[in-house]
Image (tube, helix red, strand yellow):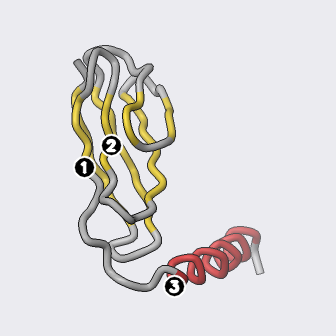
Amino acid sequence: MNKIALRTAVASAVIAPVMLVGAGTATAAPTVTAGGTGEISIAVPPGESWNCFALDSNFGFKAGVGRIGGFASGSNVTVFCFGSVAPFFFTGSVKVT
């Protein structure tokens, strides 16, 4: 078995149980809005757990939810969120002021 196939099998074995632990349906997906200068805001629905990562067009990388700052003014920020209930994934983007 080559290394890529082995890594894929291991990753699948780890991810699948995590997704099943929170089996259910999310009430809503997170929302992404522009905040103050160089900031974005990621709002997570009450009672749900989401892990979010944001990457701006200048390769600035941040993680978390709520107000996140430190992005280059005028850049586009793409947000990737992962949750434990369906829909499991969320992607959004916003232009930073």
- The Cα atoms of the two marked residues, 3 and 2, are separated by 24 Å
Q: How would you rate the neighbour count of disc 3 (Cα within 10 Å): few for under 14, some for 14-19, many for 20 or more?
A: few
User: CB of mark 1 within 8 Å of CB of mark 3?
Assistant: no
Vertical comparison of 15 with 54: above or below: below
Residue position for label 3: 20
Number of callouts: 3
| Amino acid marked by disc 1 | Thr
- The Cα atoms of the two marked residues, 1 and 3, are separated by 24 Å
| Quarter of the image with the C terminus in it | top left
In the image, what residue occupies the spot 77% across and 81% down?
1
| Amino acid marked by disc 2 | Ile
- Which quarter of the picture shows residue 23? bottom left
Out of 16 and 3, give the one closest to the viewer: 16
Instruction: Name the element at disc 2.
Output: strand
1 or 2: tag closer to the N-terminus: 1
- Which quarter of the picture shows residue 74? top left
1 or 3: tag closer to the N-terminus: 3
Q: Position of residue 11 (x, y in %)?
A: 65, 72
User: CB of mark 3 within 8 Å of CB of mark 2?
Assistant: no
In the image, what residue occupies the spot 32% across and 80% down?
25
- The Cα atoms of the two marked residues, 1 and 2, are separated by 6 Å
Residue position for label 1: 31
Residue position for label 2: 42
User: CB of mark 1 within 8 Å of CB of mark 2?
Assistant: yes
Q: Is residue 44 left or right of residue 74?
A: right
| Amino acid marked by disc 3 | Leu
Q: Which mark is residue 8?
A: none
Q: Position of residue 91 (x, y in %)?
A: 31, 53
Report the residue that reaches farthest toward the front: 47
Vertical comparison of 59 with 54: above or below: above
Q: Is residue 45 left or right of residue 61?
A: left
Instruction: Name the element at disc 1.
Output: strand
